[in-house]
Amino acid sequence: MGIWSKKSITALRAEAASSEGGLKRTLGALNLTMLGIGAIIGAGIFVLTGTAAANFAGPGVSLSFVLAGLACLFAGLCYAEFASMIPIAGSAYTYSYATMGEGVAWFIGWNLVLEYLFAAATVSVGWSGYFSAMLNEVGVHIPAAFASAPLTVINGHEVVRAFTCVDGTGATLMDATTSAAFVVRDACTAAGGTPVEGLINLPAVLLILALTFLLVRGVQESATFNNIVVAIKMTIVLLVIGFGFMYVNTDNWSPFIPEMVTNPDGSTKYGMSGVLRAAPVVFFSYIGFDAVSTAAQEAKNPQ
């Protein structure tokens, strides 16, 4: 048939019906909504807001969120229409298979695999850092060799051995895997520490294995766990907003869109162009709404 061969919606529905024993339609509107919120509220909204404000838009970053949200709104409506029309697992892969052909679907499918692969790895490594720091606070020290990556990329191209600089008690002094610039061994020694090369980020690996086991157990168990986590995350976000109001300095809102500034390297920030440049950066904060469509075959009523 060739790479442009398409699979009709009728054929896709028939395949899904024949394999109904594998995926049960158990998710309701609440579970799907919580699934979307859980995928969206993550590292992006907590980390990128300050980065986008400092490097691009200033207080005008709120407008950047509006622009990015508008783009996500239209994309979300498209996903909603496709998911109700083709209520089958696969998300964009399935939709492109039915509309543009097997070749395009193959390309999009592998892009989705890479997207989720790197997203899962990035979030698990970030979680590992916070988890290790929390354990250190209560006196439990994970050996540095088992809490950092064995390799790191410097300046976008050079691959070197990563290491963590620790003092005599096991507390982290410097971490070459998270520093903006590579921390040389001499600096570690001068700080009175011992450089320890990373072997494996064990907390991150264990987190991935635990979540994989949960997903294998079934979608209902996963949805219940996700609902609990979303409730915790929403509570934290609301608490941050609520208590944050007490520390708001409205003088920082003026000018709302600062005048454009030229950086030493010739690039610019602030101004309306800065607001526009920040929009694709904060777009990452919304990433995850498409995860709802992947559960279309497990929804009681996809429409």
Image (cartoon, rainbow, N blue to C red):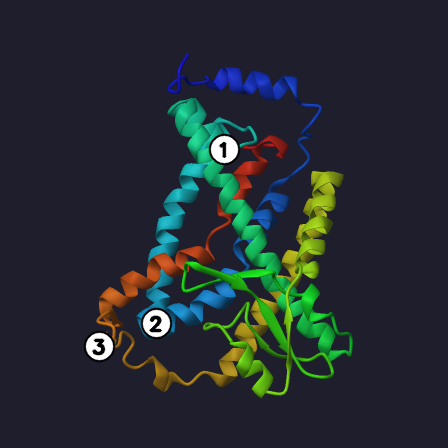
Residue found at x 61% / y 68%: 236
Seen as rendered, the residue at the extreme front is 186
Q: Observer-nearest residue: 49 or 71?
A: 49
Q: What label sits on residue 259 in the rendered view?
A: 3
The answer to which image quadrant residue 133 occupies is bottom right
Would you say residue 81 is visible in this rendering?
no
Residue found at x 53% / y 20%: 12
Give the label, 3 or 1, closer to the camera.
3
Q: Label 2 amino acid?
A: Asn
Percent across and percent down for residue 38 are 59, 53
Give the label, 2 or 3, closer to the camera.
2
Q: Label 1 amino acid?
A: Ala
Pointer 1: residues within 10 angstroms few (<14), some, or many (20+)? many
In the rendered image, which residue does mark 2 sit on? 55
**Secondary element at image label 2:** helix
Above-or-below relation of 165 to 85: below
Percent across and percent down for residue 96 are 42, 28
Above-or-below relation of 71 to 285: above
Residue found at x 60% / y 70%: 163
Percent across and percent down for residue 248 are 45, 83
In the rendered image, which residue does mark 1 sit on? 83
Pointer 3: residues within 10 angstroms few (<14), some, or many (20+)? some
Would you say residue 55 is visible in this rendering?
yes
For marks 2 and 3, the one nearer the N-term is 2
